[in-house]
Image (tube, rainbow, N blue to C red):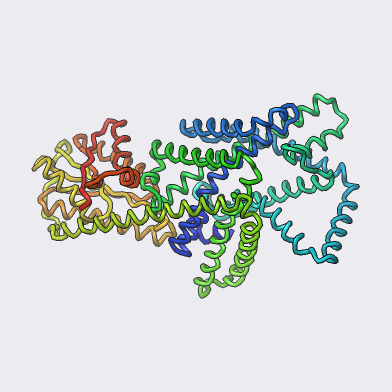
């Protein structure tokens, strides 16, 4: 909840780590989140398949579990590529069915065996006493910690609230806190009730069946109802679990591309993944998520136990970095925050708890799947670093381009140029920061169409990424910076004797905002032709094609669909 208070605009673990601990910690958090979202898809579908084949009438085909998991992944991938998202109309009946059936099972399971509670408590006390007398309390404690870790992935649902603050109704902080409380209580009651039923009914593993299915069969088997009705109830109850797990997998398909977009905006992954409004970009993100999830499912043979271990490790990596970041934050603001000691203590406790669990899991489960997630995450981090280094190299090349155009004169004042009529030939140029790239594109238009265009309009988008999406002050600075960029380009054009104006917008999605401005300009100036620059290299290869921004082509595709002309001009990296 403290994360919501400090970051009311949202952002989650990646933003917290980047803002408070630096880009390196942000990369570790972002890479861990990406792997987590892939594992969310894999583990949800694997668990759904296990639940389905735990239904008594389907259990004989349990050997097909892996194929059902992969088939479910293929169907879900196809639906996401087609643009189908979860709907309240679909999820509501699934959730209500799950809720009602499990209220019956948990309620009957607890109160139907209430007499056994005293015996269970005595046995638990005896176990603790024996462990104390024999000096085995520590292994018992470790066992509890590991069990807690295996179920702690449920915290990602609560953490997801801080990632989705932008979709909550006002007041967002109050709504976010209320949502977190409701989720925490519902998880605690449901998980606690199911675990208590396990103990009261003496549930033990039975082959490939899920423990929930074993418990549901045991509870329902004691009812005095017709066998057909009991079998139907068991089928509906377990099937609602599977359906809800598939919906959870869909959350991974939605959250993964969003994290990928944040990483792209900070140049950790190819910039092409930043444009979530571009259907092709979103499709590529979905396919990437599906391919990674499929590889993990095949590698682990769909074993939920191994996937849970991998999932838990990365979850707690993100939590540890978040808690460290929050502790650093309270130290920084202690002079102006009266309650900083209490908040620091709260996050310190969270840090110790999460750090201890992460350490235990890594040590005890390293050879049971833990090393896999460590290697995968490290591999992703190495890839991100190599991408970042490439972009820095290109930035140095662009600075040379800036130096080549540093002597270009600008108009110090408005030279009094007359605005031509609305039907006059108009060149509309999309620009980023003021520098050699944009200037080169401007002069390329002059070179290709000398003295043809009588009006120049410069359009720019200030993208609100994790470098700016940290507070009102930073966003205001971004707006001033973007406005200053447009002003410089206008002065440049006027210095060359051209009538010029400019416009800009601030937001998280460059393509969408560029299209909004383009539609307005086209409406005002029907003869407008749009231009953008595209960086080209002397030796193009798969790496340069993968890493370099496809924003210009994404906008061009959108414009062609709407009947607007756009030309992409090459800018050589020298």
Q: Residue furthest bottom?
A: 335
Numbered marks: total: 0
The quadrant of the rendering that contains the N terminus is bottom right
Residue 252: image quadrant is: top right
Residue 10 shows up from this direction: no
Left or right of residue 475, residue 525 in this image:
left
Front position in the image: 351 or 387: 387
Q: Where in the figure is residue 46, as x and y percent of width and height?
A: 62, 38
Task: Give the left or right position of residue 462, taking residue 11 as reference.
Answer: left
In x, y percent, where is residue 315? 58, 53
Residue drawn where x is 57% and y is 61% of the image: 320
Q: Residue at x 46, y 57 (%)?
A: 27
Specify the farthest residue to the front.
367
- Whether residue 2 is visible here, answered yes or no, is yes
Task: Locate residue 9, reporting x and y percent.
Answer: 48, 54
Residue at the spot 66% in from the left edge and 54% down from the top edge: 149
Q: Front-most of 289 and 261?
A: 289
Classify residue 495 by image quadrant: bottom left
The quarter holding residue 542 reads: top left
Residue 254 x, y percent position in the rendering? 51, 42
- Which of 83 and 260 lies nearest the eye of the viewer? 260
């Amino acid at each position: 909840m403290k994360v919501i208070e400090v970051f009311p605009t949202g952002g989650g673990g990646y933003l917290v780590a980047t803002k408070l601990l630096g880009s390196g910690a942000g990369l570790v958090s972002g890479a861990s989140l990406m792997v987590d979202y892939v594992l969310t898809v894999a583990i949800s579908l694997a668990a759904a398949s296990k639940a389905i084949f735990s239904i008594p009438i389907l259990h004989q085909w349990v050997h097909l579990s892996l194929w059902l998991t992969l088939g479910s992944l293929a169907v879900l991938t196809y639906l996401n590529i087609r643009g189908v998202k979860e709907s309240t109309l679909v999820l509501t009946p699934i959730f209500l069915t799950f809720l009602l059936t499990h209220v019956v099972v948990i309620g009957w399971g607890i109160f139907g065996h209430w007499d056994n509670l005293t015996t269970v408590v005595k046995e638990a006390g005896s176990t603790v006493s024996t462990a104390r007398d024999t000096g085995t309390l520590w292994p018992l404690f470790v066992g509890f910690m590991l069990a807690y870790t295996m179920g702690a992935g449920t915290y990602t649902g609560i953490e997801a609230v801080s990632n989705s603050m932008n979709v909550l109704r006002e007041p967002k902080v109050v709504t976010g806190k209320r949502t977190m409380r409701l989720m925490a209580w519902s998880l605690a009651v449901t998980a606690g009730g199911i675990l208590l039923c396990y103990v009261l009914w003496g549930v033990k593993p039975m082959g490939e069946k899920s423990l929930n299915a074993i418990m549901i069969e045991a509870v329902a088997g004691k009812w005095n109802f017709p066998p057909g009705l009991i079998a139907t109830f068991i089928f509906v109850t377990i099937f609602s679990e599977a359906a809800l797990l598939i919906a959870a997998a869909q959350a991974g398909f939605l959250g993964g591309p969003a994290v990928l977009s944040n990483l792209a905006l900070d140049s950790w992954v190819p910039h092409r993944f930043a444009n979530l409004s571009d259907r092709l970009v979103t499709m590529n993100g979905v396919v990437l998520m599906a391919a990674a999830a499929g590889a993990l499912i095949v590698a682990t043979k769909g074993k939920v136990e191994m996937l849970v271990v991998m999932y838990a490790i990365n979850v707690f990596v993100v939590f540890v970095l978040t808690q460290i970041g929050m502790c650093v934050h309270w130290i920084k603001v202690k002079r102006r925050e009266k309650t900083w000691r209490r908040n620091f203590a709260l996050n310190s406790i969270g840090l110790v708890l999460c750090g201890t669990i992460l350490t235990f899991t890594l040590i005890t489960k390293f050879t049971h799947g833990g090393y896999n997630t460590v290697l995968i995450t490290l591999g992703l981090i190495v890839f991100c670093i190599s991408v970042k280094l490439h972009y820095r190299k290109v930035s140095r090349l662009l600075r040379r381009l800036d130096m080549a155009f540093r002597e270009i004169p600008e108009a110090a004042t408005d030279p009094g140029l007359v605005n031509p009529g609305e039907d006059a030939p108009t060149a509309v140029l999309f620009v980023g920061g003021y520098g050699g790239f944009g200037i080169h594109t401007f002069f390329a238009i002059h070179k290709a169409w000398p003295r043809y265009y009588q009006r120049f309009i410069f359009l720019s988008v200030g993208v609100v990424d994790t470098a700016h999406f940290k507070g009102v002050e930073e966003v205001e600075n971004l707006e001033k910076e973007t406005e200053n960029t447009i002003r410089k380009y206008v002065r440049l054009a006027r210095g060359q004797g051209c009538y010029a104006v400019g416009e800009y917008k601030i937001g998280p999605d460059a393509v969408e905002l560029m299209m909004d401005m383009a539609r307005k300009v086209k409406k005002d100036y029907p003869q407008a032709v749009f231009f953008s620059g595209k960086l080209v290299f002397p030796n193009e290869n798969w790496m340069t094609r993968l890493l370099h921004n496809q924003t210009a082509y994404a906008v061009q595709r959108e414009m062609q669909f709407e009947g607007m002309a756009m030309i992409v001009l090459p800018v050589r990296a020298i």
